[in-house]
Amino acid sequence: MTTIIRKANLNDIDILLEFEQGVIASERPFDITIQDGAINYYDISDLIENKNSEVYVAEINGTIVASGYAKIKGDRHYLKHKQQGYLGFMFVDKHHRGKQLNKDIVNALLKWCKARQVYEIRLDVYEDNLSAIKAYEKVGFKKHMVNMRLDIKNFD
């Protein structure tokens, strides 16, 4: 079994669009605010082509089985850092989970950010997505802030 972690290119778009739907399907149970029906989260072509972002994929024997991106974003003026690397689109095909592919992709994305002198790295994960939280903690992430919501449509 040969595993390669590499930068994605536009020839990978079809499988990446499938992965995007996998991300959405896996997140819907955690978020009642996601619209029903067909939706997209990302402009994957832009993430691949934009100089401030990079998409990495994992290939096993020539088949793409995992993905993730990093995007360099400006941050709030009052923080110690001026920019952050934001990670997203973390997906591993269900037949290849448990092989540390997510960790390998995260490490490639972290190296990409560090090469651009971006040292503050953030990502979002649903509080109830315990397996994802555990995976990110294994790479060194720590819980930082809790995002809270309230639907006041029926509030008196």
Image (tube, helix red, strand yellow):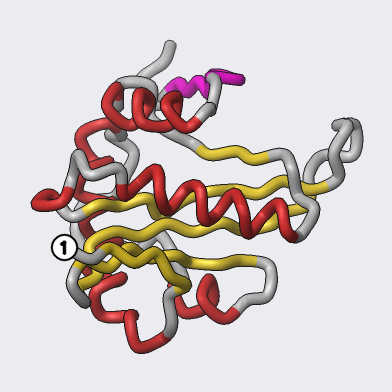
From the viewer's perspective, tell me whether residue 63 is left or right of residue 74. Answer: left
From the viewer's perspective, tell me whether residue 140 is left or right of residue 33. Answer: right
Residue 144 colored in magenta in the image: yes
x and y percentages locating residue 76 in the rendered image: 82, 39
Q: Height in image: 1 above or below 151?
A: below
**Residue 129 found in image quarter:** top left
Q: Can residue 152 be seen in this view?
A: no
Residue projecting furthest to the left: 95
Relative depth, front residue between 8 and 22: 8
- The image quadrant where one finds the N terminus is bottom left
Q: Height in image: 130 above or below 35?
A: above
x and y percentages locating residue 16 in the rendered image: 30, 70
What's the residue at 27%, 31% (across, down)? 30
Q: Is residue 127 visible?
A: yes
Q: Height in image: 133 above or below 101?
A: above
Prevailing SS of the magenta stretch = loop
Residue 99 colored in magenta in the image: no
Q: Which stretch is magenta?
A: 143-150
Relative depth, front residue between 92 and 36: 92
What's the residue at 62%, 76% (across, down)? 50
x and y percentages locating residue 98 in the rendered image: 20, 39
What's the residue at 34%, 38% (across, down)? 33
Residue located beneath label 1 in the image = 1
What's the residue at 72%, 46% (across, down)? 84
From the viewer's perspective, tell me whether residue 117 is left or right of residue 6. Answer: right
Q: Height in image: 81 above or below 96?
A: above
SS at mark 1?
loop
Q: How many marks?
A: 1
x and y percentages locating residue 78 in the rendered image: 90, 32
- The image quadrant where one finds the C terminus is top left
- Disc 1 marks which amino acid? Met
